[in-house]
Every structure is written in structure tokens, then in C-alpha cells.
Amino acid sequence: MISWEMHKLGVEEWLVSAVMSMYTGAKTVVRTVYGNSKGFEVKVGMHQGSGLSPLSLVIVMEAISRELRVALPWELLYADDLAVIAETEEKLIKSLNEWKENVQSKGMRVIRNKTKVMIS
């Protein structure tokens, strides 16, 4: 997924390859009070604790948001949060559903029970 977003944003191929090499064959362990688990390969998601992960998330969200942008900034991103502004409740639900489908098509999850609606 990250390589798709980087290509979409026009990142040069050498940099895409460098980033992807960090993810290819990456292994991790689970640290507990009883010690570390055996190492296992990470096949999905971003590296937990990596300095590159916040930037990777920004790249992913920017590429996804470009597909859904309208003329005015009706979608506001902050870290992994999204504010969608609409003139009617129907338009809001339509925009939220478009976001959810687009994000999920890229392998990410949307947690609906954390969704809040404010009417002004």
C-alpha cells in the first residue's frame, strides 16, 4: 500500500525502493513481562515505533484524501483523525461512506464506534 501512495504522490523510484526495502522481510517480537516472543514476520501495517511510521501515515492519508477532495477543504486531517464537514446530514453520511470505502480498499480500518457527529 505505501508504495502505491508514494508513486501516486510522485516520489522518485529510488526512494520508494529504499522505503520498501525496510518493510520487506521485516521481523518483530512481542515484549512481555515474561520476556520476548519468538521473532515473526510483519506482513501488514506500519512498523510500530519506527521513526518512519508517522511520515508513512501522512503519505497514505494524503494520497487517499486527494481522491476524495472537493473544491473547498471539507475534509480536515489530523494524524489518524478525520473531520468531515457537510451542509446536510445526507451529504455527511455520503462523504463518510466514501471515505470508509476508499480507506478500506487500501487495507486500512475505520472504527465507526469512535465516530462523532456534531450539528451546527
Image (tube, rainbow, N blue to C red):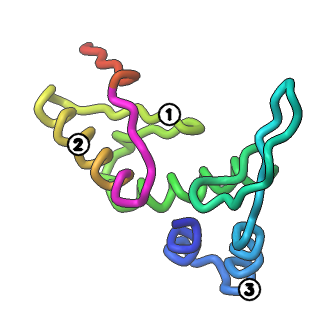
Q: Is there a contact, CB below 8 Å, between mark 2 and mark 1?
A: no
Mark 3 vs mark 2, CA separation in Å: 35 Å
Q: Secondary structure at mark 1?
A: strand
- Residue position for label 1: 81
**3 or 2: tag closer to the N-terminus:** 3
Relative to 41, is 69 on the left or the right?
A: left
Sequence-earlier tag: 3 or 1: 3
Residue topped by disc 2 = 97
Residue 107 part of the magenta segment: yes
- Dot 1 crowding, Cα within 10 Å, few <14, some 14–19, many 20+: few
The circle on residue 14 is: 3
Residue at the spot x=65%, y=56% of the render?
A: 56
Q: Is residue 27 left or right of residue 9?
A: right
**Which residue is pictured at 17% across the width and 41% down the height?**
94
Q: Nearer the viewer, residue 76 or 32?
A: 32
The disc, 2 or 1, on the residue closer to the chain's N-terminal end is 1
Q: Tell me the distance, in whole angstroms, between the alpha carbons under discs 3 and 1.
A: 30 Å
Q: Residues within 10 Å of mark 2 (few under 14, many from 20)?
A: few
Corner quadrant of residue 91: top left
Q: Amino acid at mark 2?
A: Asn
Give the dominant element type of the magenta stretch: helix, strand or loop: loop
Helix, strand or loop at mark 3: helix
Label 2 residue SS:
helix
Residue 53: x and y in percent read 71, 51
Residue found at the very far left of the displayed protein: 90
What range of the chain is rendered magenta? 104-112
Question: Given the image, on which type of amino acid does mark 3 rest?
Answer: Trp
